[in-house]
Amino acid sequence: MMNKVSKEKVELYEVVRPLLHSAYSEVKVMSGKKQSEQLNLNKVKIINKLLDKVLILLKDEPTIEFPSKTG
């Protein structure tokens, strides 16, 4: 049985995907730098918000096995 994806989820995906890709690229570049450099706290908050949106997109997927968000 094929699941239908809502228009809202498609729109959310289209917004989140490039932002998440950009964040990934930035973290990847930072991972190659000195360990003494830290990721800006605001960037961490933005990445966490993006990941919250990803969880919304994946919540109905049968393969998602993330623990529920606490706090």
Image (cartoon, rainbow, N blue to C red):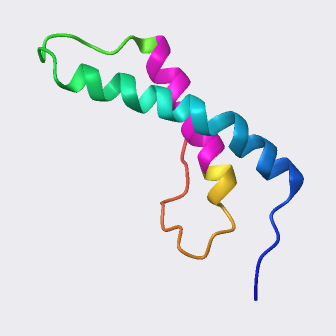
Read off the magenta span.
42-54
In percent of width and height, residue 45 lies at 51, 22
Q: Is residue 33 visible?
A: yes
Q: Is residue 41 left or right of residue 20?
A: left
Tell me the residue at 55%/23% (across/down): 46
Where's the C terminus, which quadrant? top right
Residue 59 sits above or below residue 47 on the image = below
Whether residue 49 is visible here, answered yes or no, is no
Residue drawn 29% across and 29% down?
A: 28
Quarter of the image for the N terminus: give it.
bottom right
In the picture, residue 19 is in which quadrant? top right
Q: Is residue 67 left or right of residue 38?
A: right
Please provide percent x and percent y for residue 67: 48, 60
Which residue corresponds to the image point at 71% horizontal and 34% vertical from the top-left? 15
The picture quadrant where one finds residue 29 is top left
Instruction: Determine the residue located farthest toward the right in the rendered image.
Output: 7
**Residue 33 sits in which quadrant?**
top left
Prevailing secondary structure of the magenta residues: helix
Q: Position of residue 4 (x, y in %)?
A: 82, 71
Residue 45 part of the magenta segment: yes
**Residue 58, position as x, y percentages in the image:** 63, 59
